[in-house]
Amino acid sequence: MLADFVLIGAALVIVLAVLSAAAHLRTRTPYGGTPPAVAQAMVVLAGLRSGETALDPGAGDARLLIAAERACPGIRAVGYELSPAVWLCGRVRLFLSRSGARLYLRDALCADVSAVDVVFLYAGPEMMRAFAEKFARELRPGTRIVSHFFRLPGREPVTTQEVATGRKKRRVFLYVW
């Protein structure tokens, strides 16, 4: 009986690992959590207001969703994550933090973003190009996009902020659509 549970558990871990590796290959963006200081700077730069919807299309472990919701409790925080293992970590983090944010195991490029007020991005160059094309089709004028490290192709940031994270400095870009 115990051996059956061990085998099932091992099989689930292997399936999660394979699906997660496939997701990272598809997006060409490995998981790399946003440093806390950067997440905080992104949330402040976004200028969130109660009643707004904030989206993290590559939400990872949901730390930005939680930070945004804590900074402005009246928002609706939504995230998408394509990697099952990372998504599961995010769901656990949301549960433990008692957050009302929603995290979906889904490809953000297939989601409707037309009602979003703020978008948080930390994605590699290929995904940034894909998001720029999607945003051109779907975002409303005035939507704010806050990007960590990578620039949004074809757009000039309204503001660029440097954030110290230990010995490194990271850049955060604010765009207004």
Image (spheres, rainbow, N blue to C red):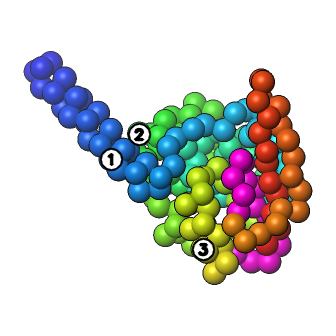
The magenta stretch spans residue 142:
yes
Q: Amino acid at mark 3?
A: Lys
Along the horizontal axis of the image, is 29 left or right of 42? left
Front in this rendered view, residue 112 or 151: 151
Q: Looking at the image, can residue 17 be seen?
A: yes
Which residue was labeled with disc 3? Answer: 134
**Viewer-closest of 150 and 146:** 150
Q: Which residues are magenta?
A: 139-152
Q: Position of residue 144 (x, y in %)?
A: 79, 64
Residue position marked by numbered label 2 in the rendering: 85
Magenta stretch, main secondary structure class: loop
Q: Is residue 17 above or below residue 146?
A: above
- Mark 2 vs mark 1: which is more N-terminal? 1
Label 2 vs label 3: CA separation?
Answer: 26 Å
The local secondary structure at tag 1 comes to helix
Q: Amino acid at mark 1?
A: Leu
Do the residues bearing badges 2 and 1 touch, measured as CB atoms within 8 Å?
Answer: yes
